[in-house]
Every structure is written in C-alpha cells, then in structure tokens.
Amino acid sequence: MADKRVLRGSYNQAYQRPGPLFGLRPDPALAQVVRRHAPSGRALDIGAGDGRHSVFLARSGFLVEAVDVSEQAVGKLRQLARRGHLPIEPRVGDCSHRGVIAGPYDMIVADTVLGHFEPDQARCVGARIAHALAPGGWLFVTALADSDPRESEFANLSWTYFTREELIGLFAGLRVERCEELSIVDRTHGETHRHRVLRLIAQREAG
C-alpha cells in the first residue's frame, strides 16, 4: 500500500546528496516536442525534483509551476531558479490533492511520477491532468512499464507499473501522438540500472 510519508522521507533524504539527483539534462523527446509544438506559455512540471525539466522549460520561454512532494527537492530548485533568474515557481504539493493542478496549462510534464499512486489515484490524477490542459496544450509523460526490472534504488517507492493501454487510458479525451516503450540504462543515481519506460506524448485538441 502507498505510504506518502515514506515516499516523502525517502526522497528528502536522497535530495540531500550533493548535485542534481537525476541530472539537469531534459529528456530529448521533450525538447523535440517544445521545438515543434509548444515554444512558450504556461507549464506545469509534476514531480519536478530539483529541476531538470523545469529549468529547460523556463529557458525555453515558459512560465513554470514546479510541484514535488519533497521539501528538499523544492528547496534546491528554488535556489537554482533564484540564481538563474528563471521564471519558475517551485512549491511542495501532492497532485492527488484537489487544487494542486489548477490550469489551464500549455504544457504539462509528468516524469515517472504516476507510479507513486495506487491505480485508482493514478486514474484520478490522469483525469485532472487532462482537464488542466489548455486547448491545443501538450502533455509529456513517462511512466515505468509493467516489464520494468525494478533495479532502481527507488523501486520500492513505485506502487503502480503500467501497460501501454493502461497509461493511455488515464488521459481520456486527449489525442495521443505516440506512446512507446523504451529500454534505458540509468546512470544518474545509485548503481547503474536498467528501466523499461513508457513515454506518452498527447495533445488536447483546440476547439
């Protein structure tokens, strides 16, 4: 069963490590989406951590709301945004709580965060995300696939793993541009480990 106190405590401890926990390079696929479709506007980064996607979005011309359950992560991102004079509003929040996802947003990023919810909660969060997109807005999601080998040091903090159909089903009403399963090697934290990740890119159509 999901225990958000354990989740918050584990990530608070991890974010006390020096340097960015997951690096500061954005997912190249997100950079491609921004270049092609959404060069500016209002963005929400859910599970922002210490900022690899928030910083990229801010430097790309977005006004960014960055939400994470970890006070340590939000504190590090706040310092980074202040030093870089970046338009990022970091705040502590749990997106399963009402009002945390306000909208409308031209871009929403949710990077490996949906697995931190039980399936029923994940469906509720997915519906809120879809509703919060502005007409024409874009969604970029990564989630651990049900085939993930569970090698990460944080594997015990992920309570839901998804099939492609389950992930797409969270965002009813959006046009899915693509949803693909990827095999990656992660060297950003802990011991080098493998992941099977689903990457979903979708749009709320205008009109």
Image (spheres, rainbow, N blue to C red):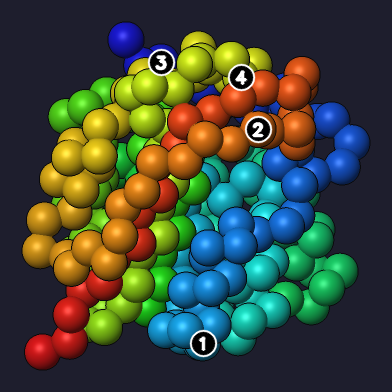
Front-most of 22 and 82?
22
- Inspect the image, locate mark 3, and give the three-letter code of the amino acid beneath it: Asp
Residue 105's disc is none
Q: Position of residue 148 (x, y in %)?
A: 44, 22
Earlier in the chain: of badge 2 and badge 1, it is 1
Which is more N-terminal, label 1 or label 4? 1
Does residue 195 sit above or below 111 in this rendering?
above
Q: Quadrant of the N terminus?
A: top left
First in sequence: mark 3 vs mark 4: 3
Q: Nearer the viewer, mark 1 or mark 3?
A: 1
In the rendered view, does 57 fall on the left or right side of 2?
right
The span from disc 1 to disc 3 (Cα, nearest Å) is 37 Å
- Between the C-alphas of marks 4 and 1, the distance is 33 Å
Label drawn at residue 152: 4
Q: Nearer the viewer, mark 4 or mark 2?
A: 2
User: How many residues crowd around disc 4 within 10 Å: few (fewer than 14), some, or many (20 or more)?
Assistant: some
| Residue under the image location 17 percent in, 87 percent down | 206
The answer for how far apart the CA atoms under marks 2 and 1 are is 29 Å
Real-space Cα distance between discs 3 and 2? 27 Å
Which mark is drawn over residue 185? 2
Q: Position of residue 205 (x, y in %)?
A: 18, 80
